Each structure stands twice: as structure tokens, then as C-alpha cells.
Image: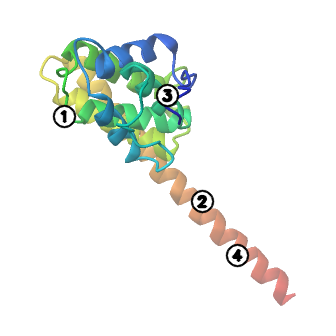
């Protein structure tokens, strides 16, 4: 990351990135420039330190977007979920709760988009996003009961699939070892 040449983020949809910029680095809500840098430095030491002695600094939204662009798309989703749960400091005020809910719903739907739960391949990042989103959406007071039920159903279904896959992998490994052992004894 370079504060001299901030990059646009292509890892998230442009509309979502614009919403995140407004929520966390906008004129009515969000973190200060140093707080943005400090937040992202928790994920990578490659994020440049905030330089107080620099004459020119990019706008906060450019810093925010540039920092987020330094990570792979799947990790960006986890970082966005962490942002939603981040208590502050928010020098310019907390994000609008409706915007937070829109981002949570996007994260949840993005992980499951285009697939039925039975066919989802869950990456570690994906499972973390689903779990965090489901908990956040379930605990939100204004979330409709049907959405909370779908979140819970999805987490349970995906956890069950993950357990089944782990069991199949261990059985397959045992069969391969047994096959190798029988070949060696012949």
C-alpha cells in the first residue's frame, strides 16, 4: 500500500465498495485516517504506517479502499465482517445500522450465491463469513424471523456437510493406507 498512489479495489462489487467507503471513511461516519491504517495493519504488516510528516495524504475513503484492495477477495469478506463488528473508534460516527444490515445480508448471500446449500464448497474464509454473518443477523433486533431461521439453517447445514466431508476424507485416507499396505505384503 502506498499513501502516495492509492489503488482502487476490484475484489468487491463497485456498489458495495462505495457503500463501505461511505460507512467507514465518509463525511458522516467512519474512522479517522490513522484509525483506518491501524485497523488494516492488524491483518498485514505490508500496510504502510500513517505518516504524520507527509504534506499530502489521500482522502480517507481512498486510504480505506486501498488498504482493503491489498487482500484477496475471500479475505476482504472476512475483513468487512470484522469491520461490521468493530466497536471503534469512529471519529466521524458509527455507520448507519441499515447500511450495516445491507452489508451483512450481502456477505451472507455472496457466500451462498448461485448454489444450493448441498452444493456449496466451503472454504475456511467462507465458513467464517457464514458463521459470523449468521450470528450477527440473528442477534440483530430488526431482522425478520425468516431471515434468522435461514441463517441458522445454513450454518447447521454447512457444518453438517463439513463434518461429512471430513469423515469421508479420513475413511478414504484409511483405505489408501490399507491398499498400500496390502500391495507391499504381496
Closer-to-camera residue (14/92)? 92
Relative to residue 53, is residue 115 drawn left or right? Answer: right
**What secondary structure is found at the residue carrying circle 1?**
loop
Closer-to-camera residue (137/117)? 137
Quadrant position of the C terminus in the picture: bottom right
Quarter of the image for residue 53 reads top left
State the CA–CA distance, disc 4 to disc 3: 48 Å
Q: Position of residue 81 (x, y in %)?
A: 34, 33
Tell me which residue sits at (42%, 22%) in the image.
109
Which residue is denoted by mark 2 in the rendering?
A: 169
| Disc on the earlier residue, 2 or 4 | 2
Tell me which residue sits at (41%, 27%) in the image.
55
| Disc on the earlier residue, 3 or 2 | 3
Which residue is denoted by mark 1 in the rendering?
A: 89
**What secondary structure is found at the residue carrying circle 2?**
helix
Which residue is denoted by mark 4 in the rendering?
A: 177
Which residue is denoted by mark 3 in the rendering?
A: 66
State the CA–CA distance, disc 2 to disc 1: 44 Å
State the CA–CA distance, disc 1 to disc 3: 20 Å
- Asked if disc 4 and disc 3 are in contact, CB closer than 8 Å, the reply is no
Q: Position of residue 40 (x, y in %)?
A: 39, 40
Looking at the image, residue 88 lies above or below residue 5? below
Classify 10 Å Cα crowding around label 1: few (below 14), some (14-19), many (20 and above). some
Amino acid at each position: 500500500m502506498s499513501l502516495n498512489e492509492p489503488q482502487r479495489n476490484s475484489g468487491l462489487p463497485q456498489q458495495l465498495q462505495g457503500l463501505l467507503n461511505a460507512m467507514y471513511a465518509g463525511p458522516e461516519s467512519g474512522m479517522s485516517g490513522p484509525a483506518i491504517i491501524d485497523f488494516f495493519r492488524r491483518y498485514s504488516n505490508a500496510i504502510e504506517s500513517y505518516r504524520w510528516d507527509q504534506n499530502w495524504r489521500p482522502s480517507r475513503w481512498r486510504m480505506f479502499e486501498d488498504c482493503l484492495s491489498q487482500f484477496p477477495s475471500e479475505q476482504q469478506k472476512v475483513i468487512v465482517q470484522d469491520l461490521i463488528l468493530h466497536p471503534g473508534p469512529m471519529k466521524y460516527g458509527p455507520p448507519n445500522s441499515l447500511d450495516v444490515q445491507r452489508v451483512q445480508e450481502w456477505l451472507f448471500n455472496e457466500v451462498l450465491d448461485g448454489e444450493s446449500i448441498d452444493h456449496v464448497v466451503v472454504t475456511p474464509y467462507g465458513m467464517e463469513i457464514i458463521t459470523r454473518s449468521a450470528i450477527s443477523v440473528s442477534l440483530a433486533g430488526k431482522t425478520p424471523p425468516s431471515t434468522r431461521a435461514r441463517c441458522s439453517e445454513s450454518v447447521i447445514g454447512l457444518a453438517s456437510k463439513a463434518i461429512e466431508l471430513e469423515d469421508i476424507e479420513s475413511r478414504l485416507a484409511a483405505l489408501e493406507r490399507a491398499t498400500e499396505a496390502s500391495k507391499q505384503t504381496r
